[in-house]
Structures are given as structure tokens and as C-alpha cells.
Image (cartoon, rainbow, N blue to C red):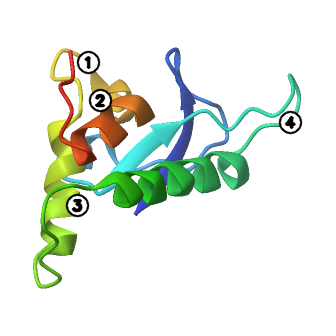
Amino acid sequence: MIIINMTSDGVVPGSTRIAEKDIDVALAAGFDGAVTDDVTGTSFSSPRVGWFLAAGEAVRTKDLDLDRWAIEFRQQLRSLRDPQASNYLKLLFDPVRYVKAQAQLPNP
């Protein structure tokens, strides 16, 4: 999985990237890696995404099929992307929506 350091303004300069042509199929997520105004990076955004993924698993209500977990995980991430967003902004990870989806709670 690729984690990109980004905000709602886009990818933070110097962050990991993927080719734009692969955005729609990549197992990728973007998340803010800022610690302070001058300290930021995927070293901070990656564990944050990991924590929210683990939180989602902790509240999961759907039965887990270990043979399909990786496929369902990819589908879940892709289904939460904003179809109205453009380019890299499609990858911006919304942890609240993800955790709610895992708990099968309504998402707006």
C-alpha cells in the first residue's frame, strides 16, 4: 500500500507519489503527515493511516473471510474515494468515513 503525504490542498512537495494514470487502481491513500509547520512527511502520515485501518478492524461488524480480506480491503478503500475529486485528491483518506463503514454505520 502506498501512503502519500497530502492535505486537502493536494500532495505535499517531496512526498511519495504514484503515476497519475494509476490513481484509480492503486492501493493508495493520502493523509496529512504534518507535525509542525516545518516537520512533515510520509513517516508521519503512514502510521496515522495504519492506526485508523486498525481501528476499523477493531469495530468491523461484517464477517471476515480471510481468503478475500485483501480484495475486500482494496474495494473498501476505493469505494470511499470522492468521485468528484480530481487527480491525487481522490486518494485523500477520510478516517471517520472508513471506521464508520467498517462498523456498518451510516455515512453521509
Residue ID at (19%, 73%): 69
Indicate the position of residue 12 as horizontal and vertical percent values: 62, 30
Per the rendering, the mark at residue 85 is 1
Mark-to-mark CA distance, 1 and 4: 27 Å
Mark closest to the chain's N terminus, 1 or 2: 1
Residue of label 4: 39
User: Looking at the figure, which quarter contains the N terminus?
Assistant: bottom left
Mark closest to the chain's N terminus, 3 or 1: 3
**Mark 3: which secondary structure?**
helix
Mark closest to the chain's N terminus, 1 or 4: 4
Residue type indicated by callout 4: Val
Mark 2 vs 4: CB contact within 8 A: no
**Outermost residue toward the bottom in this view:** 67
Mark 1 vs 2: CB contact within 8 A: yes
Mark closest to the chain's N terminus, 2 or 4: 4
Mark closest to the chain's N terminus, 2 or 3: 3
27 or 86, which lies in front?
27
From the image, state whether disc 3 or disc 4 is nearer to you. Answer: 3
User: Looking at the figure, which quarter contains the C terminus?
Assistant: top left
Indicate the position of residue 13 as horizontal and vertical percent values: 65, 32
